[in-house]
Image: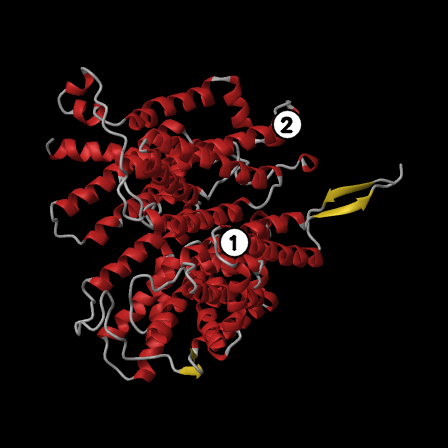
Amino acid sequence: MALRVQRFPSASPSAAIAARAVAIVLALVTAGLLLAAAGAQPIRLGQQVLRSTFSGFGIEDVGLLVTPLILTGLSVAVALRIGAWNIGAEGQFYAGAFAATGIALFVPGPGVVMLPAMFVAGALGGLIWIMVPTLARAYADVSELITTLLLNFVATLLVYYVSTGPWLDPGGHALATTARLKHDVPEFFGLVHWGFPIAVLLAVTLAVAFSFTHWGYEVRIAGSNAQAAKYAGMPFRRHLIVVMLLSGAIAGIAGMLEVAGTVHRLQGGISNNFGYLGIMVAVLARGSCIGVLAGAALMAVILNSGIVLQTQGVNTSTVLAITGLILFFTAIGDELAHFKITRSQPA
Amino acid sequence: MDLVTGILHTSLLAGGVLALAALGEVLAERVGVVNLGVEGLMALGAITGIAAVVTTKSPTAGFLLALGVGFLVGMVFAAITVLLRANQVLCGLALTLMGTGFAATVGKAYSGIPAPATFVALPLPYLSSIPLLGPVLFTQNVLVYLIYIVLPLLIHFLMFRTRHGLNLRAVGENPAAADAAGIAVQKIRFWYVTMGAALAAGAGGYLTLAFVPSWSEGVVAGRGWIAVALVIFAGYRPLNAVLAALLFGVITSLGFVGQARNWPIAAPILSMLPYLGTIAFIVVPVVAWHRMRQAMAAPAALGIPYYRDLR
């Protein structure tokens, strides 16, 4: 009887979760060592982070950060369900924020009407932004990964252009932003606005739709084996288009809620990398809509730590690098979770 | 130099960044590995280049160091994606985040410092005095000649005219068959992915040593992603990749000219051109010419790790 390492086609859930946990811890330890090498004191920084995260303000800050992360995470996760990589949540986020701001700035009306209108505009903005990549993928098999990503740069430039040019605050109170929007998403608790419960509700609704509806069943089949889905007569192309447009719309909603709930002005850099971090969230959640809630919470804590670290002289790009480190270790852990030590059968 | 010569000269210079990165990606994708970390590798190469040239005052040292950093990081990436067989999309995205973040962190100290020495134009005797074409083609720096002439021809010859090239393409198309024929699949994948990463970082070095030439956060500005897209547009062929990069050089330099000459179009709108152009160029051909799809198709095993025991 000899022991040997064998790879299995699917990882057991417990091994997968354990690998994830180890990966995240190792990534943070590595980051700490690198920071120490750069002359920082990681242990003191860690204590600082923990103290301010679990203070009253810390919880509210995390609540503000978690809302867009849930939504962009959902956006990526939903597309992954049918096997599409939406790397463009960042751009759709900007497009949604742009559309909602346009409505808020140029259409007069009471808040009761305007907020829902902005919400719809945000969703439509995101949807339109993913339209070309969706159709190109569905009808010409052009990789959506590249097209969605390239549109991020276009959306970023568009928002930068309008907020410094045509839509620049005429009052001149702030540089390089639009005027303050007249309509706010009302507060839910403390500083956290109603976007948070909306995002959670959306995650739960989507989880139910994927698990318990005929549509969800077909999308899951199409995502795990497109050939089988087509052979079984499922409308693969229609599902692909609907799911990708839905993915764009969700990211657009994230942008609308961010501009109308948190920032209140459209400005360059408003997305705060939420679109890219959404990829992290979806990957950490393994494409599960409920898992997105946990993944977003983790990312929000990391982001908030980043803000705390900034006051200690560690800058945002370092946080981005640490995020990449976590993603890297997670990818390694996911693969290692497939291996088991087994006893070979006696001949 | 008149306007047309100026545009073409800048196009060649601007396209060089994309051409070098795209050639690197061709190497990786031809053996069946998608490297989405090009953007991050370029950022690392860019900061390495500027840091080295500030210290040594030698652009050649800067470029070689950028290649070296790309080679080392590429070995790590190849070890994880080829040998360990982790998910290529995730590792690539992670590499982009790490590279961009790390370069920006280190780059704070170098932000806005112009490179004290750059690759200067090296006019070729006789050729550079040809009217119109001479100043465009033959008064460039040494890297431009390397990127547009030496490297693509070398890679093309290696890939399509040698036994080794046939082997490496077989690894990208059908690794199981290649393995059965006695080709060392994992070894070939490992080294080509590593070399591809080195070229991507070299492209970053070119950016800060010959084109921009200084470091600022976001200096790479999505060029890595455009390079990945160009490889698809070029049908995974090295010579096409260089021509495609040149086309994008033209689009980029039109944007520059527009800004310099005060065209009535806002600068951010002009800056959108390369991205929109890239999308148009990867979408339109496949829609317009269905027959091209076969000829320009990706290697069949692209993105799929190879497990000998599952073949």
Q: Distance between the residues labelled 2 and 1?
A: 45 Å
Position in image of residue B248 (x %, y %): 28, 38
For residue B236, which quarter of the picture?
A: top left
What amino acid type is highlighted by mark number 1? Ala
Q: Which residue lies furthest to the top in this view?
A: B126
When asked about the image quadrant of residue A6, the answer is top right
Q: Is residue B228 left or right of residue B187?
A: left
Q: Position of residue A139 (x, y in %)?
A: 42, 48
Say whether residue A64 is left or right of residue A82: left
Q: Position of residue B177 (x, y in %)?
A: 62, 28
Where is A187 relative to B159, above or below?
Answer: below
Q: Where is residue A30 in the image (x, y as percent from the top left)?
A: 56, 52
Mark 1 = which residue? A36
Q: How crowded is mark 1: few (under 14 residues within 10 Å), some or many (20 or more)?
A: few
Residue at x 37% of width, y 30% of height: B61
Secondary structure under the numbered disc 1 in the rendered image:
helix
Nearer the observer, A34 or A328: A34
Which of the chains bears the disc numbered 2? B
Report the residue marked by disc 2.
Answer: B179
Q: In this view, does B252 lie to the left or right of A134?
A: left
**Three-letter amino acid code at the position of disc 2:** Asp
Observer-nearest residue: A136 or B266?
B266
Q: In which quarter of the image is the C terminus of chain A?
A: top right
